[in-house]
Image (cartoon, helix red, strand yellow):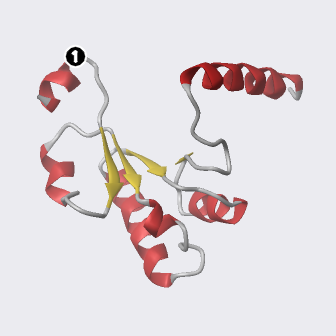
Amino acid sequence: MLHTLSGMGGSTAIYDFGTGFSSLSYLRDLPIDKIKIDRSFVQDAAESDKNAAICQDAITLAQELDLRVVAEGIKTAKQHDYLMSLGCEVFQGFLFARPMPLDSLSTWLTQHASMSTKGS
């Protein structure tokens, strides 16, 4: 089914990468476009050598496989900056915005798009 979806131009991601049933064989065998590093690794990556190693390895592996990496659960600028220094390019979390209904998201995107163009 995932191969059919990919053939139609769909995009797929493995959420909570590194936990539960996210096997490395999925990266090899399935048409995956991105992985999302679980927030349990992200939250202390700047302070924990073990979490930092897991994040670095996930980012490196994804880059070698031509996948995008999303860091989940970014709450602080320190987390963002640290993961960016490891090569992560996509982030999600409360640092940027809280979850919201579609109507609120549309308004939020419009407001933030106009604010970012005012500075250019």
Asked if 20 appears above or below 2 in the picture, the reply is below
Residue at the farthest bottom position? 49
Picture coordinates of residue 35, whole percent (x, y)? 35, 48
Asked if 103 appears above or below 43 in the picture, the reply is above
Comparing 4 with 93, the one in front is: 93
The quarter of the image holding the C terminus is: top right
Q: Would you say 23 lies left or right of 54 here?
A: left
Task: Kindly identify which residue carries mark 1.
Answer: 8
Q: Would you say 26 lies left or right of 97 here?
A: left
Picture residue at 34% right of the left edge, 49% below the top = 15
Q: Residues within 10 Å of mark 1 (few under 14, many from 20)?
A: few
Residue 115 sits in which quadrant? Answer: top right
The quarter of the image holding the N terminus is: top left
Residue 46 sits in which quadrant? Answer: bottom right
Picture coordinates of residue 43, whole percent (x, y)? 54, 68
Instruction: Give the secondary structure at mark 1.
Output: loop
Q: Amino acid at mark 1?
A: Met
Picture residue at 49% right of the left edge, 54% below the top = 71
Asked if 72 appears above or below 96 in the picture, the reply is below
Picture residue at 40% right of the left edge, 50% below the top = 36
Comparing 16 with 54, the one in front is: 16
